[in-house]
Image (cartoon, rainbow, N blue to C red):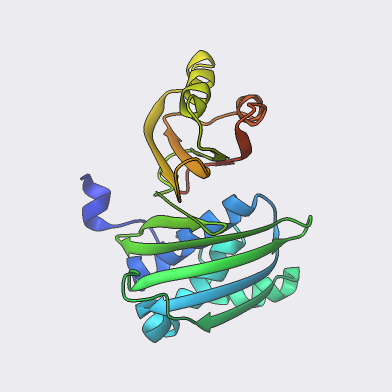
Amino acid sequence: MNIFDIIGPVMVGPSSSHTAGAVRLGNAALAILGEAVAEAAVGLHGSFAQTGRGHGTDLALVAGLMGWSTDDIRIPQAFAYAREIGLKYCLKNINAGDAAHPNFVKIHLKGRKGGESEMAGASVGGGQIIIKEVDGFPLEFTGDFPTILTLHEDRPGAVAEVTGILSRRGVNIAQMRVFRRNKGGLASMVLETDQPVDDADIAAVAALPLIRSVRHIPAIS
């Protein structure tokens, strides 16, 4: 724990969970898409659904999808700015089940270059977030570090090949987790690194035979 866990982030209020965390969730969804957003379908669960409008959660999520920071003074006018740039958005309440965090959101995006992605995550307090799902695949990361996400075949050597490439290229892994639905199927590797990873590093990982796809997500401020 550090001082920012206690006093919270620099932000436009009123709530670190409902506003700052929501901005960062929007930032994360944008980073996962990897291009400017054309259309967004946003599902709000629990407290986000019940009190989100009063806390500006809806505005904060849209602000995050435009790449704004938690302290951007334009957040109260996010809807107007979104209309100006042609970002289409739809917000609705959903029921993600009793196991979901009260501040849970699912975001489906279409990009201006034709890309598409879906992310689910939660704002867990003090502006901190946890991403729980990407494109329907369960995983977990916080966005506090530069992050590499892989989708790969669950075969012996897959993890060692990826970590070996990063080691040889001087990239230090801060944390790593592997998630899978079933043995021998598809798995996802989450690697949080101490330094940004460049395009050449990502290309080297993507070229490995067992890798189906790879994403690089910069640290979310």
Q: Residue at x 27, y 50 (%)?
A: 4
Q: Residue furthest right?
A: 113
Q: Nearer the viewer, residue 58 or 160?
A: 160
Q: Quadrant of residue 81?
A: bottom right
Indicate whether 140 appears above or below 45.
above
In this orientation, does residue 71 appear?
no
> From the image, which quarter does the N terminus lie in?
top left
Indicate whether 13 appears above or below 183.
below
Q: Residue at x 24, y 57 (%)?
A: 7
Q: Residue at x 60, y 31 (%)?
A: 210
| Residue 193 spot, x, y in % from top left | 44, 32
Q: Nearer the viewer, residue 88 or 60?
A: 88
Q: Residue at x 65, y 75 (%)?
A: 89
- Residue 83 relative to residue 41: left or right: right
Q: Residue furthest top?
A: 168
| Residue 80 spot, x, y in % from top left | 65, 77
| Residue 51 spot, x, y in % from top left | 37, 84
| Residue 65 spot, x, y in % from top left | 59, 63
